[in-house]
Amino acid sequence: MELEILRAIQSAANPALDVFFQAITMLGEPAALLLIFTILYWTADRERGERLAYALAVSLPVCNILKELVKAPRPIGEMGVRSLRIHTATGHSFPSGHSQNAATAYGLFALTARRPAWRWACGALMVLVGFSRLYLGVHYPKDVLAGLALGLLCAWGTEALWRRVKSRETLCLLSAALLLPFLFFFGGHDLYAAEGCLAGFALAVPFERRFVRFTTEVSLRVKIGRWLGGALLLGGMAWLLKRLLPGEGPFILLRYALLVFAGMGLYPWLFTACEKRRGRGQ
């Protein structure tokens, strides 16, 4: 039944739609979410950036734990199914990580948006990203539906916790403590990477709140400088760590934890110190 649905969707395929849905699916990938997060966190709204990071830091390991539990095969290679952009289809099929990422991020924006038009736009993005996974032939319908539902649940749940728990530092550490033990039962690159992001986030938030407390109320020139400097720093750090650390097991976790901690803790400390020194010199 699900294969028939995929074949029916792909019966309308053409080069223009191929380009469109490959572009849409990128909105659920780490690169797009990282771009959105860094712009939000470093330059626009630190608090909302933290909330987005918390939602994604919880959603990512939950998704990968479920993938390891279910171990569902993908439709790639099935008769009559054409699969595109398969290099992004890592791990097992259920749930759809792209759909869950999109529902978590854009669902959170929809929950906090003041204007109905923004809510509708965020909802449309979630649906389009999910549908793109079907059009591209890398997921079954049940994978996408589960991913969207879990992503919305993560967005709603983390936002509720963020608002109700007074000690954000304790909340972050408890979240990491609850999800990290699953590494003893499951493995895989994606799960280690997801757990590393959560660990880095849990360490970065207390560090930033205790030692930095930066503001985003700065000039546009400073905002641009922050983002460009951060992109170069994290890009260089990612390149270096990938070559220095083995690409397996706990080293994957360590690499992603260091990157997230640097982006959310050390880099804000660095640019705040530089901006203060520049301000004194003027």
Image (cartoon, helix red, strand yellow):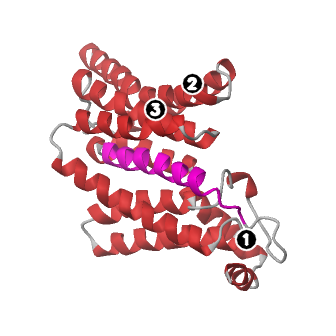
Q: Is residue 128 visible?
A: yes
Tell me how many marks there are: 3
C-alpha distance separating marks 2 and 3: 11 Å
Q: Is residue 91 above or below residue 6?
A: above
Can you see residue 44?
Answer: no
User: Could you give the CA–CA distance between mark 2 and mark 1, rounded to whole angstroms?
Assistant: 34 Å
Instruction: State the extent of the magenta-drawn residues as a range.
Output: 49-74
Of residues 149 and 185, which is closer to you in this image? Answer: 185
- Describe residue 253's horizontal placement relative to residue 106 as left or right: right
- Which label's residue is closer to the chain start, 3 or 1? 1
Q: Could you tell me what secondary structure mostly forms the magenta stretch?
A: helix
Amino acid at dot 1: Asp
Q: Nearer the viewer, residue 148 or 264?
A: 148
Q: Residue at x 56, y 42 (%)?
A: 191
Residue kind at label 2, given as amino acid type: Met
- Residue where numbered disc 3 is placed: 260
Percent position (x, y) of residue 11? 76, 85
> Residue 244 location in percent, x, y?
66, 18
**Chain-order first, disc 2 or disc 3:** 2
Q: For the residue carrying disc 3, how many other residues have a C-alpha within 10 Å: few (<14), some (14-19), or many (20+)?
A: many
Could you tell me which quadrant the N terminus lies in?
bottom right
Amino acid type, mark 3: Val
Q: Secondary structure at mark 1?
A: helix
Give the labeled residue for mark 1: 18
